Image (spheres, helix red, strand yellow):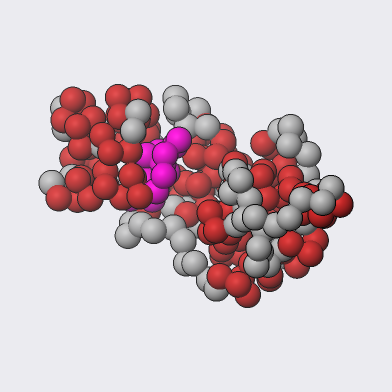
Amino acid sequence: MMIYRQLLGRYEAQHWWPGETPFEVMVGAVLTQNTAWSNVEKAIDNLKGLDALNLESLLTMPPDSLAAQIRPAGYFNVKTKRLLNLCRFLQQNPGLEVLDTDELRARLLSIHGIGPETADDILLYAFDRPVFVIDAYTRRLFGRLGLIVHDCGYESLRADFEAALRSDSTLFSEYHALIVVHAKAHCRTKPVCVSCPLSEQCRYRMDQLANGISAV
């Protein structure tokens, strides 16, 4: 919580996820795999421009046409298949909101192309479930802080975060967003340590100073 408060104090609340409907959030969660959000926005805008950002339209659109619309998100042929898998699942499984979180997560993970991070994005941001999303930014930041080991498994790390925080979907969504914002501003692949709000407790930074390496 100390890390969360420091990030919140620097960047303020982010009010994620940037989506107008739960379905748009789910589409975005698939499209954002292995790409920047700016590319996802272009793909989503293409679908909105055709008034096609809904379950029925995506299921009736020819796959080649769908692939063309989501091309900006990259890996468009693979993502077309994954998106259609998700859409068919949603069509065949109405009333998912009544399921408990563990059962809903298990069903999402049964969809070909939906892995733990994507499933947890959907759970947190589309279904408002208190599930902490673990992504590459989280691993990088907390690894550099010396609070996790880099090879820790996804499920173990997710459970550790959820155990260390109060079970609150608003807290989890804000925390995840703040981690992403901070990783882009400071905790990059090549870190920018100057003016970083977490530098005083960052083990990586302390090691740099101990070795006589000046801040970037």
* Residue 189 x %, y %: 60, 43
Residue farthest toward the left in the current orientation of the protein: 50
Q: Could you tell me which residue is drawn at 58 percent across and 53 percent down?
A: 183
Q: Could you tell me which residue is drawn at 78 percent across and 39 percent down?
A: 149
* Residue 82 x %, y %: 37, 29
Instruction: State the residue in front, 71 or 201.
Output: 201
Q: Could you tell me which residue is drawn at 30 percent across and 24 percent down?
A: 77
Displayed quadrant of residue 117: top right
**Residue 14 belongs to the span the image colors magenta:** no
Q: Is residue 10 left or right of residue 166?
A: left
Displayed quadrant of residue 12: bottom right
Image vertical order of residue 164 relative to residue 85, above or below? below
Q: Is residue 45 visible?
A: yes
**Which span is picked out in magenta?**
24-37
**Residue 34 belongs to the span the image colors magenta:** yes
Q: Could you tell me which residue is drawn at 49 percent across and 39 percent down?
A: 118
* Residue 146 x %, y %: 80, 48
